[in-house]
Amino acid sequence: MSDRYDIVIIGSGVAGASTAYFLKKKYNVDNIVVVEKEKTPYSHASGLNAGIVRQLVETMPIAELAKKSVEFFMNPPQDFCKDNFYLKNGGILTEKDQTDLRISTFLKFTSKLGISYEEIERREVLNKIPFLEEAPFVRAVYGRDDGVLDINNLLSSYLKGVEVRTSAEVKNFKVEEGTIKQLILDGNEIECNVVVMATGAYSEGIARKLGLNHIYLDPRRRHLLISTEIEGLKNNFPYYWSMNPQFYFRYESGGLLFSPCDEITMLPEELKATGESLSWLYERLKIGAPKLTTVQIKRYWAELRTFSFDNNFLIGFDPVIKNLFWVTALQGHGMTCSAAVGEISADLVCGYKPDIDHNPHLPKRP
Ligand SMILES: Cc1cc2nc3c(=O)[nH]c(=O)nc-3n(C[C@H](O)[C@H](O)[C@H](O)COP(=O)(O)OP(=O)(O)OC[C@H]3O[C@@H](n4cnc5c(N)ncnc54)[C@H](O)[C@@H]3O)c2cc1C
């Protein structure tokens, strides 16, 4: 006999977890299960990212989601999380080159939405982050409400009270008359009214399994590296993001967490971290933050950020399979936008209109 639920969410990453949270919290949907193929929840991108909340982003639709999420992080419901999961230390983004138009372009979105970003002088940057003395940037902006998430606290709070089955890979689907009738796992089957596909980098492979040819995704590998402890370093400075050369860092456990912002397209089955990431990082630091080239790296890893063709997300019902709902392609902004993404998904799954324009993220773009 197969199990039966109203909603099955495939994937316990932030997309699945935040959707489950809002389905329960906003719509009292209790008969939900999250199925996760790994032994522990959120062990892919969602559990292995930098946790940076940056609202200065590449598209207006994503900036809107970031803004709405940050409002949630700054003022969560009282029963959401007993610990402080959002450290609002701000963020600084810099440009080395006056011809780089990215910051100017992104600022158009934030200023239209009233998100707080201001140009700051070099001396203010150095006041906040002294080890940037020799950094060659010509322009800096400061996002006052940006910060860093405690990703474990956030994810466990989204999943509080939700049934999660781990080591439960959905291997196949029984589809009849344009509807998923059954999910086939090792040793059992599950039936449900709606399937929420929150499978991150695995989503395109799953689409093909379902015979769908309209989902095209681009998973790109990115490395994170952690330094050994740096004497006297305190967790009281903003994250730093250099746009050219691209790299970022933030405080982590007495040292710094870095990314050389590498992006190589890769299938999830091929993902492997490489020691070359250290030289990529040091090359960028040599140009962009020379004082930091003496830090020692003690650990590194890599995960995938998943992109759609137009840099917006994929949120909504599938145009071909009626009871299939996609929430994926959250790129490098999944944590930042998670509260808004979860709420929009829950609204749409339950048949309500979200309070922000979700059309740019529909699987079938308008
Ligand atoms: C190095 C790096 C740094 C990042 N830094 C930031 C940051 O600072 N700020 C930010 O906002 N975002 C950041 N991101 C992006 C963020 O991590 C992602 O956008 C987000 O985690 C994607 O969440 P997801 O739930 O879509 O995917 P995932 O977290 O990958 O979750 C998908 C889940 O589905 C499961 N699954 C797949 N197939 C099946 C199946 N058949 N059956 C059952 N389960 C299945 C997988 O095991 C996985 O657990 C970063 C990403 C990377 C890689």
Image (cartoon, grey):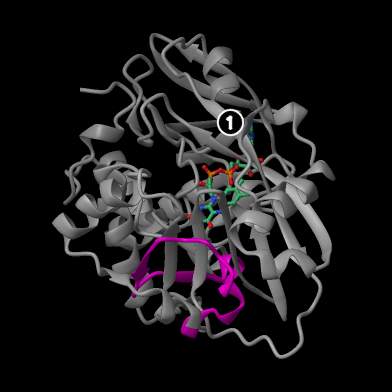
Q: Secondary structure at mark 1?
A: strand
Residue 1 spot, x, y in % from top left? 64, 30
Q: Is mark 1 within 8 Å of ligand 1?
A: no
Q: Nearer the viewer, residue 360 or 100?
A: 100
> Magenta segment range?
127-153
* Residue beneath the point at 71% across and 91% down: 232
Residue 80 spot, x, y in % from top left? 43, 75
Viewed as shown, does residue 170 lie left or right of 8? right
Task: Decide if residue 161 is in sight here.
Answer: no
Q: Is residue 178 magenta?
A: no
Viewed as shown, does residue 294 lie left or right of 195? right
* Residue beneath the point at 63% across and 41% down: 262
Instruction: Please tell me how crowded label 1 is: few (under 14), some (14-19), or many (20+) other residues with Cα within 10 Å.
Output: many
Q: Nearer the viewer, residue 138 or 243?
A: 138
Residue 177 spot, x, y in % from top left? 39, 8
* Residue beneath the point at 66% across and 58% down: 285
Q: Is residue 274 above or below residue 54?
A: above
- Tell me where residue 275 sits by quadrant: top right
* Residue beneath the point at 39% across and 54% down: 337
Q: Is residue 145 above or below residue 259?
A: below
Q: Residue furthest bottom?
A: 232
Determine which residue is flagged by label 1: 219
Q: Nearer the viewer, residue 343 or 239?
A: 239
Task: Decide if residue 357 is in sight here.
Answer: yes
Q: Is residue 39 above or below residue 145?
A: above
Circle 1: residue type? Pro
User: Where does ligand 1 appear, by image quarter?
Assistant: top right
Q: If the image is split into quadrants, where does the C terminus sit?
A: top left
